[in-house]
């Protein structure tokens, strides 16, 4: 018999993987995610509702049910009061840039609807888990670059002539609006949170799936499609986040926050209750921890993620713990008010998201 009771415990989901040419083994070797297949892994899609790469519940009474079905059946219990989304609203990934990602962009909402025929574009944020000394990223276009100059540089592969190169350090986060040209790597391990979308345009003479060459005419067409979706305005920066001392031995760092998603990093010496006002993806980037919901207790291993339905209300993390919590926020309730109470001004809060341009 198909289970009809709404989700009342943490949900463990399948993890689709992408084996793009820039990937390696860091998600397994550095982060400890030991259940992934062998070979090159560029991306582990921790919680995904993207068509064709969607997560499925892997255990418990809802085992075998796609995430999309849970959203349709229990929208408020899963996502939060008043929610009626057609799909789970954000996507979380672990990305191993053992090599360098292609220079690419994702359309913003309006452009995606107009040119891609999709309901949303893809704004994203990267939280750097590990990076080699001297690691850099490309993000945003230099001031004064117009479409003609950008086209010429992309065709020639002269990316530093037109794009901003930024230093990358572990523990920092950057909010990347849709329409922003970007790339990172090599030797960089990232947790990414983004809108649920897979729209992309890239500028490279090779395919990211296997490194095979892109014919010159196809590359030129790709660059024209990219230019039609390019936004020259965003020039975001990596930020360390804003820390809130929640309790003795409990710190919450708000890493990024905007209308589509927010991401916090919790460091817990012994025990902390984390509010779950909306669907939250908890990713363990430290040692194994225990999660407690009422009388239910379960472990969360290294590099593993779990989806916490809004109906849980809260979860207690028993540490020592170092976990990331991704969610779609009520910006005033979940982000602005607690940061004001901790002494941060409006400008600092705005720089966590789209205000950092």
Image (cartoon, rainbow, N blue to C red):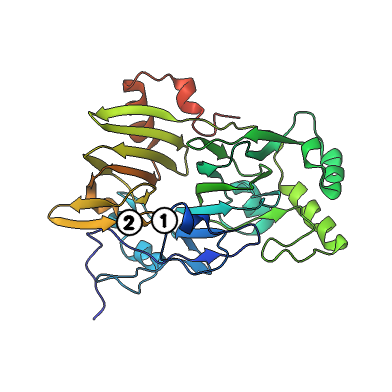
Which residue is located at x 23 percent, y 52 percent? 291
Quick one: 281 or 131, which is closer to the camera?
Answer: 131
Rendering quarter of residue 345: top left
Q: Is residue 192 left or right of residue 344?
A: right
Element class at badge 1: loop
| CB contact under 8 Å: marks 1 and 2 | yes
Residue 99: numbered disc: none
* Residue 252 point in image, percent of width and height: 34, 34
Image location (x, y in percent) of residue 64: 35, 74
Horizontal relation, residue 159 to residue 9: left or right: right
Question: What is the quadrant of residue 6 in the picture?
Answer: bottom left
> In terms of image quadrants, where is residue 18?
bottom right
Q: Position of residue 199 (x, y in %)?
A: 62, 57
| Residue located farthest toward the bottom when viewing the structure as drawn | 1
Placement of 122 over or under 14, stated as above or below: above
Q: Nearer the viewer, residue 319 or 48?
A: 319
Relative to 246, residue 110 above or below:
below
Regarding residue 177, the answer to whether it shows in the image is: yes
Q: Residues within 10 Å of mark 1 (few under 14, many from 20)?
A: some
Q: Which residue is mark 1?
A: 32
Q: Is residue 126 visible?
A: no
Q: CA distance from mark 1 to mark 2?
A: 8 Å
Question: Exactly how many numbered labels are in the figure?
Answer: 2
Q: Which residue is mark 2?
A: 301
The quadrant of the image that shows the N terminus is bottom left
Up-down relation of residue 70 to residue 285 (above or below): below
Q: Earlier in the sequence, mark 1 or mark 2?
A: 1
């Amino acid at each position: 018999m198909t289970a009809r009771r709404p989700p009342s415990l943490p949900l463990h989901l399948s993890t689709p993987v992408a084996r793009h040419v820039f990937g390696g083994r860091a998600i397994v070797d550095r982060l400890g995610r030991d259940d992934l297949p062998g070979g090159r892994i560029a991306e582990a899609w921790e919680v995904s509702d993207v068509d064709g790469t969607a997560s499925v519940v892997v255990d418990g009474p809802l085992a075998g049910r796609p995430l999309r079905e849970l959203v349709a059946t229990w929208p408020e219990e899963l996502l939060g009061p008043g929610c009626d989304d057609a799909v789970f609203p954000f996507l979380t990934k672990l990305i191993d840039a053992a090599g360098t990602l292609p220079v690419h962009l994702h359309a913003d909402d309006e452009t995606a609807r107009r040119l891609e025929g999709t309901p949303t574009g893809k704004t994203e944020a990267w939280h750097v888990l590990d990076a080699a000394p001297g690691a850099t990223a490309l993000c945003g276009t230099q001031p004064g670059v117009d479409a003609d100059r950008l086209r010429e540089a992309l065709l020639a592969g002269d990316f530093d002539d037109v794009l901003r190169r930024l230093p990358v350090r572990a523990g920092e986060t950057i909010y990347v609006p849709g329409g922003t040209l970007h790339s990172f790597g090599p030797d960089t391990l990232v947790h990414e949170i983004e809108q649920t979308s897979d729209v992309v345009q890239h500028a490279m003479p090779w395919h990211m799936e296997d490194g095979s060459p892109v014919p010159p005419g196809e590359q030129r067409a790709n660059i024209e499609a990219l230019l039609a979706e390019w936004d020259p305005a965003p020039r975001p920066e990596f930020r360390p986040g804003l820390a809130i001392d929640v309790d003795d031995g409990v710190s919450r760092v708000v890493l990024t926050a905007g209308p589509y998603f927010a991401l916090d990093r919790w460091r817990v010496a012994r025990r902390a209750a984390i509010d779950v006002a909306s669907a939250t993806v908890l990713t363990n980037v430290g040692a194994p921890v225990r999660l407690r919901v009422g009388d239910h207790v379960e472990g969360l291993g290294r590099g593993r993620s779990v989806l916490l339905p809004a109906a849980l209300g809260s979860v207690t993390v028993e540490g020592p713990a170092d976990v990331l919590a991704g969610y779609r926020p009520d910006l005033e309730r979940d982000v602005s008010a607690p940061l004001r109470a901790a002494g941060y001004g409006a400008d600092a809060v705005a720089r966590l998201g789209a205000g950092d341009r």
